[in-house]
Image (spheres, rainbow, N blue to C red):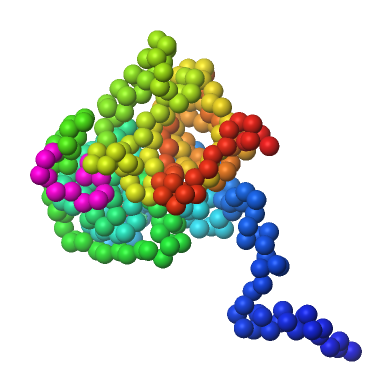
Amino acid sequence: MSTREPSALDQLYQDLADADLNPLWTQREGLMPETPQPDAVPAVWRWKDVYGLAERSGELVPVGRGGERRAIALANPGLGGAPYATATLWAAIQYLGPREQAPAHRHSQTAFRFVVEGEGVWTNVEGDPVAMRRGDLLLTPGMHFHEHHNTTGAPMAWLDGLDIPLVRGLDAGFFEFGPDTLATTATPAVSRNERLWGHPGLRPVGVPARPASPLLAYRWEHTDAALAAQLELAAQGHPGVVGDGHAAVRYTNPRTGGDALSTIRTEMHRLAPGARTAARRVAGSAVWQVFDGAGAVTLAGLRHEVAAGDLFAVPSWVPWTLETADGMDLFRFSDDPVFEALGLDRSGDEREADR
Ligand code: 1HN
């Protein structure tokens, strides 16, 4: 067998690799594609499937110290089994059985809960008991101690959203256990943070607040009324909706007017009966959950029928369209605030989305 002398060029590449160096000219396309090329793919999870598996987990797997939460993550099929819905977002269904408790801890990852059905769980955030009810958005900003307890004889499940993959990518994760016993078993209908910060347009004077949103609960009655008003006014010829028959609100930090959470945008969308949105795409990723009604989402040209509770992931730059015959409400969360803070935000309209 004859072995060829390596050419000077072969030797150069070998020596570069041996020196932990890597030349750009062999990598440019992968490093700098013309548009985002997410590993995550458009994906849909059905509520009845996810809920059924959560229920079975509830029967077989206890919740407690160590595992901390009975949360089952949406694992995007493009991400090789990682528990991530998109490149930056974690989404999970969390299930808490009758009288169960999920112990206190805190972490630098930002979290929220969105309740698609049920009630009876209180989440204590920094010792403030916050009721969780259908349609509510509850915040757990970074480094806030939190624990959950189910006060009823029925199980409850909800959607958890966190910025876990983003924080992982930034190597910014910190985690700390809290006390083993509940900070409080009180079950007020209205939490202290809502009593201070939950009055529209009114900011308490002299009440100290951390940079994160001091308001931790956004109640469905307000969200519902805001969306209903937008569509009613639009139908009467007044301006102000996102699109024809499409109203949306963003949850905000009442102290700053900015996003309710620093790394995650949270929104509720309402489509009037017969509405269809224009195709749109953005740099950055999102996860949606149908809250009420039914319709269809088209992701990168593929149409999926969806109904209450169903979830779908929209990776960066994937065009999406929503449509409904009888009306549909959808909760959306995304990494938009990160893209905006870093000057990476971009969007494309229907024309571009079709290219
Ligand atoms: C967490 O603390 C919660 O507090 C939910 O409910 C999901 C996933 C990973 C790490 C911490 C919660 C989580 C989590």
| Residue placed furthest toward the right | 1
Whether residue 235 is situated above or below residue 121 in the rendered picture: above
Residue 193 appears at what percent x and percent y? Answer: 17, 42
Question: Going by the picture, which residue comes out furthest to the left?
Answer: 206
Q: Residue at x 36, y 63 (%)?
A: 173
Pinpoint residue 128: horizontal percent, then vertical percent: 16, 47
Answer whether residue 284 is magenta in the image: no
263, above or below 273, in the image: below
**Which stretch appears magenta?**
204-217
Residue 249: x and y, percent?
37, 30
Q: Quadrant of ligand 1?
A: bottom left
Q: Quadrant of the C terminus?
A: top right
Residue situated in front as seen by the camera: 289 or 340 = 340
Residue 171 spot, x, y in % from top left: 41, 65
Where 124 falls versus 280 (above or below)?
A: below
Outermost residue on the top side: it is 236
Q: Quadrant of the N terminus?
A: bottom right
Q: Is residue 98 visible?
A: no
In this view, which residue lies farthest toward the front? Answer: 343
The residue drawn where x is 34% and y is 56% is 109
Q: Could you tell whether 152 is left or right of 70 in the image?
A: left
Drawn side of residue 253 relative to residue 338, left or right: left
Is residue 238 or residue 121 the one in the foreground?
238
In terms of secondary structure, what is the magenta stretch mainly? loop
**Residue at image x 47%, y 19%?**
245
| Residue ID at (27%, 26%) | 221
Q: Is residue 210 magenta?
A: yes
**Residue 182 appears in view:** yes
